[in-house]
Image (cartoon, rainbow, N blue to C red):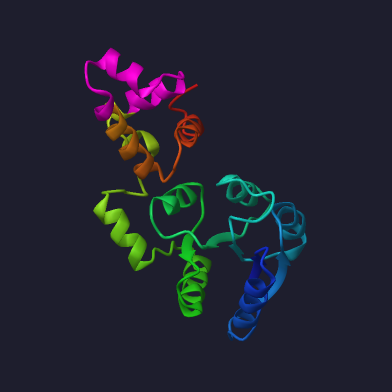
């Protein structure tokens, strides 16, 4: 039996998930939470195999909750279940350690399949996310240093120093639009949306101090 912990601050969604999972022959709901603090507090007692996690709950900030869950003793596998589309945003959560990223626009059958897959120790990549990864040539097996080109690493380090695109362009002898293109490409590869998140990801990977 796969023990599933459900974390979502919307009552209708949470109750619907619980009903679907309890009606699935090889799954049972072992706990629930409506906020990030509750997740961390209740997971310790739930002894769950998989946590289905919404990333837009109160107290949740980006990928930090995923990392905190995985830092727990005997951590469960993490399935992100969110309104976000399966695009670059998914990349950041998968790199943070999540085993699957599922949009709420998909059917409950796909979620059940994802839970079974990650419980067996594998990742679940939806067809939509697989298409995105292929289109942008993103390999989740690569480290951040391997994923970025030497030029992109230079841009990231300059951003970490607080330099603007116009400053980086002047030092590099290119136009600001060229640097902006680099920044956009870096964001896509890392699955983040802001320069602050780019720099934080680089720090987490040890690329910058």
Residue 71 visible (yes or no): yes
Q: Name the magenta segment's main secondary structure.
A: helix
- Residue at point 50% right, 73% down? 111
Rendered-image quadrant of the N terminus: bottom right
Q: Position of residue 79 (x, y in %)?
A: 53, 62
Q: Could you tell whether 172 is left or right of 106 in the image?
A: left
Q: Could you tell whether 59 is left or right of 129 in the image?
A: right
**Quadrant of the image occupied by residue 28:** bottom right
Give 15 or 112, whichever is nearer the viewer: 15
- Residue at point 51% right, 76% down? 112
Q: Could you tell whether 68 is left or right of 102 in the image?
A: right
Asked if the stretch drawn in magenta spans residue 159, the answer is: yes
Q: Is residue 120 above or below residue 74?
A: below
Q: Could you tell whether 188 is left or right of 47 in the image?
A: left
- Residue at point 44% right, 63% down? 122
Residue 147 visible (yes or no): no
Give 144 or 61, whichever is nearer the viewer: 61
**Quadrant of the image occupied by residue 2:** bottom right
Q: For the magenta stretch, what is the residue range?
A: 153-178
Name of the residue lying farthest toward the top: 171
Asked if the stretch drawn in magenta spans residue 64, the answer is: no
Q: Position of residue 178 (x, y in %)?
A: 24, 29
Q: Position of residue 169 (x, y in %)?
A: 28, 19
Q: Is residue 68 above or below residue 81?
A: above
């Amino acid at each position: 039996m796969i023990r599933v912990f459900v974390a979502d601050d919307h009552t209708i969604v949470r109750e619907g998930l619980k009903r679907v999972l309890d009606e699935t022959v090889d799954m049972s709901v072992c706990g629930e939470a409506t906020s990030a603090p509750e997740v961390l507090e209740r997971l310790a007692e739930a002894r769950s195999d998989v946590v289905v996690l919404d990333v837009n709950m109160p107290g949740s900030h980006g990928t930090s909750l995923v990392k905190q869950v995985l830092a727990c003793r005997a951590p469960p596998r993490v399935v992100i279940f969110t309104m976000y589309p399966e695009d670059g945003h998914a990349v950041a959560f998968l790199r943070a350690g999540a085993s699957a990223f599922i949009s709420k626009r998909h059917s409950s059958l796909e979620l059940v399949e994802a839970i079974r897959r990650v419980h067996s120790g594998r990742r679940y990549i939806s067809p939509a996310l697989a298409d995105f990864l292929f289109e942008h040539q993103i390999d989740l097996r690569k480290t951040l240093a391997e994923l970025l080109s030497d030029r992109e690493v230079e841009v990231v380090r300059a951003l970490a120093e607080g330099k603007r695109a116009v400053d980086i362009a002047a030092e590099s002898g290119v136009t600001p639009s060229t640097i902006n293109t680099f920044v956009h490409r870096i964001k896509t590869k890392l699955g983040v949306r802001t320069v602050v998140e780019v720099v934080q990801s680089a720090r987490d990977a040890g690329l910058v101090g």
